[in-house]
Image (cartoon, rainbow, N blue to C red):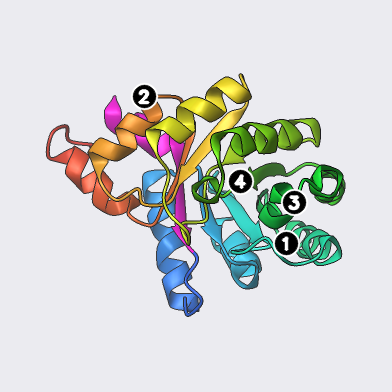
Amino acid sequence: MEISRFVAAIDHTLLKSDATGGEIAQLCAEAKRFSFAAVCVNPWHVANAARLLSGSGVAVAAVAGFPLGATTSTVKVFEAGEAVQNGAQEIDLVMNVAALKEGLLSLVSDEIALVRQVTAGAKLKVILETALLKNEEKRIAARLAVESGADMLKTSTGFFGGVTEDDIRLLAEAAPGLGIKASGGIRDAIFALRLLSVGATRLGTSSAVKIIHELEKKQPMY
């Protein structure tokens, strides 16, 4: 039960700047083997991943505005739209954290809405970068994402700190019924399962296979 729950929630992630085509091929092969929900890759790799995963049931997720969220709205819109054209079925968009902190809430919401328009038919996850936000800012960010058409909230890029259980609880309360992707620092089975138990519906991790092997020691997968 634990393994199947984990497998169905996983975004198998490889976002290193030096990731090669061979490493992406391995990522996709592992995703197909275990039937993960998605692979999460940089835009450069989307077309290749979409080709490798065609017909598998595993989605391709692409990041946009990654990792800082500090590119302009025009750039994010183009990047996300091109990723969908190249085969991405999910977009993980980094919110403009600085704009949120400056109180430029219309800019934040308008940007998400514009990306939503060019990614129709794809699942849109908005990365809030919770490690940089106060709790009230997290609630505001969650509300803006929901109002602007996000399908899921995502906690972190992993560049500035990882997800916490308290983050998941807060976002689940702030956006009831919306999916929540926990990401950043998920490297072992115990933590992964705790995040799921407190409300995460998706897990972004580059340690998915390692975690599965941990779980298999307790409960064989096959």
Characterize the local packing of mark 3: few (<14), some (14-19) or many (20 or more) Cα atoms within 10 angstroms: few
Characterize the local packing of mark 2: few (<14), some (14-19) or many (20 or more) Cα atoms within 10 angstroms: few
Nearest the camera: 203 or 97? 97
* Mark 1–mark 3 distance (CA, rounded to whole Å): 29 Å
Residue 150 visible (yes or no): no
Q: Which residue is mark 4?
A: 128
State if disc 3 and disc 2 touch (CB < 8 Å): no
Secondary structure, mark 4, is loop
Question: Which amino acid type corresponds to the residue marked 2 in the rendered image?
Answer: Ser
Front disc: 4 or 3: 3
Q: Which residue is mark 2?
A: 197
Q: Return the disc, 2 or 3, that comes first in the chain's sequence.
A: 3
Q: Return the disc, 4 or 3, that comes first in the chain's sequence.
A: 3
Percent position of residue 88, x then y: 67, 55
Count of marks overlaid on the render: 4
Secondary structure, mark 2, is helix
State if disc 2 and disc 4 touch (CB < 8 Å): no
Residue under the image location 63 percent in, 59 percent down:
63
* Mark 4–mark 2 distance (CA, rounded to whole Å): 21 Å
Q: Which residue is mark 3?
A: 102
Q: Return the disc, 1 or 3, that comes first in the chain's sequence.
A: 1
Identify the magenta region: 1-14
Residue under the image location 55 percent in, 29 percent down:
171
Examine the rendered structure and indicate whether residue 19 appears above or below residue 83: below
